[in-house]
Image (cartoon, grey):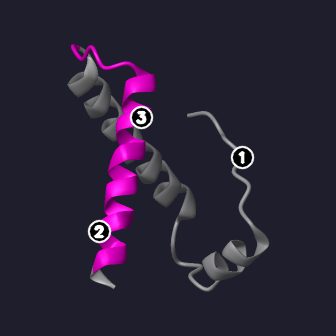
Amino acid sequence: MVSVTLSVPEDLKKEMDRFPEIKWSAVARAAIQKKIRLLDEMNELLADSELTEEDALAFGKKVTEKAARRHQKER
């Protein structure tokens, strides 16, 4: 196994220190594995897509704008 150094903010380290029984390297390893699985699933879903990154960003912007308008109406 290789070693990877992870930097965390000081306040986060203080929070981690409250739980000395936790193997934080195992927590980080699990989180990394989960993220890789998610990215692999996304790549698989998008493998046959003809949507460009530019199209996806434009679509995301429209969705965000519509959601913001709906939120304003509900207030």
Please, what secondary structure does the residue beneath circle 2 have?
helix
Please, what secondary structure does the residue beneath circle 3 have?
helix
Question: Which segment is the magenta one?
Answer: 48-73
Residue drawn at (29%, 68%) of the image: 70
Q: Is residue 13 above or below residue 47?
A: below
Give the crowd class for mark 1: few <14, some 14-19, many >=20 residues within 10 Å.
Answer: few
Closest to the observer, 43 or 34: 43
Q: For mark 3, what is the residue?
A: 58
Numbered label attached to residue 5: 1
Give the crowd class for mark 3: few <14, some 14-19, many >=20 residues within 10 Å.
Answer: few
Numbered label attached to residue 23: none
Amino acid at circle 1: Thr
Closest to the observer, 60 or 3: 60
Residue drawn at (67%, 41%) of the image: 4
Distance between mark 3 and mark 2 Cα atoms: 19 Å
Q: Is residue 14 above or below residue 26?
A: below
Residue drawn at (71%, 80%) of the image: 14
The outermost residue toward the right is 10
Q: Is residue 21 above or below residue 40?
A: below
Residue drawn at (31%, 20%) of the image: 51
* Left or right for 5, reference 73: right
